[in-house]
């Protein structure tokens, strides 16, 4: 038995944020009114994306945002999250911007004012402090925040990320209620 496609949120619903037609959002997610979510992004259960001051949060295409992730824009400036990012379970994102093709591992915290480039990996449990700037293809790990440059080409991440998205689009609607 194949699953029918999820019923996505649309901009036409006045009480819902503008969301692309192929975006998958589990029913128990909280998505604020000033949030714009790009095509193909997947929000796992219990994701919270809010902006208490009403400043925009703009999330690009084909992102995977896992369970219990909290994305909060506590500023009056826009927060921009690029495309093809993986934000893992329990992470807290309060940054200014995140580029494309990044992995933010479980329970990482990206504090207010931080800027993350493209192709970065932020390790599990790592806390980036306020206004930190992470250059492209930087890997940060451990309690001492060790930094090194990645030598992996970005297309490796993109290929794996695309397969991950395809599986989630197939499986999540079978086990969770969708918005």
Image (tube, rainbow, N blue to C red):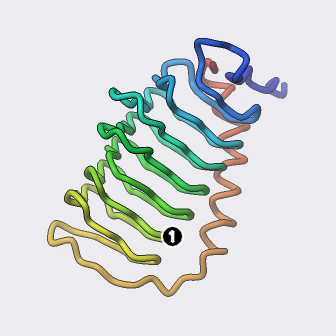
Percent across and percent down for residue 147 are: 28, 79
Q: For the residue carrying disc 1, how many other residues have a C-alpha within 10 Å: few (<14), some (14-19), or many (20+)?
A: many
Q: Nearer the viewer, residue 154 or 81?
A: 81
Question: At 30% across and 37% down in the image, what residue appears?
Answer: 74
Left or right of residue 44: residue 105: left
Question: At 32% across and 45% down in the image, what residue appears?
Answer: 94
Percent across and percent down for residue 11 are: 69, 23
Q: Say how many tags the image has.
A: 1
Q: Quadrant of the N terminus?
A: top right
Question: At 41% across and 28% down in the image, what residue appears?
Answer: 54
Extreme residue in the left direction: 144
Left or right of residue 112: residue 3: right
Left or right of residue 121: residue 75: left
Vertical position of residue 117 compared to residue 34: above or below = below
Q: Quadrant of the C terminus?
A: top right
Vertical position of residue 121 compared to residue 98: above or below = below
* Quadrant of residue 116 within the rendered picture: bottom left
* Quadrant of residue 123 within the rendered picture: bottom left
Question: At 34% across and 41% down in the image, what residue appears?
Answer: 90
Pointer 1: what residue?
A: 118
Q: Nearer the viewer, residue 80 or 173?
A: 80
* Quadrant of residue 4 within the rendered picture: top right
Q: Nearer the viewer, residue 95 or 107?
A: 95
Percent across and percent down for residue 3 are: 79, 26
Extreme residue in the front direction: 76
């Amino acid at each position: 038995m194949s699953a029918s496609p999820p019923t996505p949120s649309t901009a036409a619903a006045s009480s819902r944020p503008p969301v692309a037609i192929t975006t998958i959002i589990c029913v128990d997610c909280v998505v604020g009114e000033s949030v714009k979510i790009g095509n193909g992004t997947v929000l796992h259960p219990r994701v919270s994306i809010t902006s208490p001051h009403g400043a925009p949060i703009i999330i690009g295409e084909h992102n995977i945002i896992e369970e219990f992730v909290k994305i909060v824009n506590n500023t009056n400036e826009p927060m921009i999250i690029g495309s093809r990012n993986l934000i893992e379970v329990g992470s807290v994102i309060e940054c200014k911007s995140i580029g494309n093709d990044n992995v933010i591992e479980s329970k990482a915290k990206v504090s207010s004012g931080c800027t993350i480039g493209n192709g970065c990996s932020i390790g599990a449990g790592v806390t980036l402090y306020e206004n930190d700037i992470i250059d492209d293809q930087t890997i940060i790990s451990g309690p001492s925040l060790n930094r090194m440059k990645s030598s992996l080409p970005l297309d490796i991440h993109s290929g794996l990320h695309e397969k991950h998205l395809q599986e989630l689009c197939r499986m999540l609607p079978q086990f969770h209620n969708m918005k």
